[in-house]
Image (cartoon, rainbow, N blue to C red):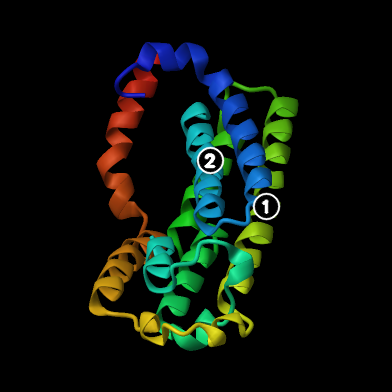
Amino acid sequence: MELLPHAHSIFFPWLMLLGSIQIIYAASTSLGQRNLKKRIAYSSVSHMGFIIIGIGSISDTGTGYDRLRLLYLDQMGGMAILMPKIFTVFSILSMASLALPGMSGFVAELMIFFGILTSQKYLLMTKILIIFLNTIGIILTPIYSLSMLRQMFYGYKLFNTPNSYFFYSGPRELFISISILIPVIGIGIYPDFIFSFSVDKVEAILSNFF
């Protein structure tokens, strides 16, 4: 918006359409992925669709691979017992991905939907259609996210793995995980801190080009 405000004022309806397609397509594709990195990558692409819609509306994977040398979900199972700290962090971040209240994902998606509903640039039926498409993405998110959590951390497949020393959660992983958790929870509890950096700029852009 800030770099190309005039172009944004012209193409913002297409951004809404592109974001809606991206949410559903990437979430649907994520469901069919057996590879852990690919599933998380597609889920991230799906969530980026919400960012695109927000504009238009006016690393745990590495830890698991480093320890287990496994990427495919059907080869995993039992990490909750062997890596309890990583399991806790991964579960919290999965809840943030589901937009659980009190986390950054909830604030972000709430603001996006509020922006769609209050936008004066779209007809009521257009708003309903956009919200319906985005709701499909929200429904698909817990399906692939909780399925991934179950396949990775529950079960007993990893108990037969000979390299048991891989299961230790060192200070490196904990430091990175805490560095991610603090802003995720902090923004969810007190989002005004982030908004204070952007509200004035966004209002100035909207007043000049919309």
The one of 100 and 30 positioned closer to us in this rendering? 30
Which residue lies at the image location 65% right of the left edge and 60% below the top edge?
142
Q: Is residue 163 left or right of residue 171?
A: right
Q: Is residue 56 above or below residue 91?
A: above
| Residue 117 in view of the camera | yes
Residue extending farthest to the front is 162
Instruction: Name the residue that disc number 1 marks.
Output: 31
Which residue lies at the image location 42% right of the left edge and 82% below the top edge?
163
Q: Is residue 37 above or below residue 113?
A: below
Quarter where residue 136 is shown: top right
Q: Is residue 33 left or right of residue 106?
A: right
The number of discs equals: 2
Q: Position of residue 175 (x, y in %)?
A: 25, 72
What amino acid does circle 2 point to?
Phe
Instruction: Name the residue that disc number 2 marks.
Output: 50
Q: Position of residue 131 (x, y in %)?
A: 68, 39
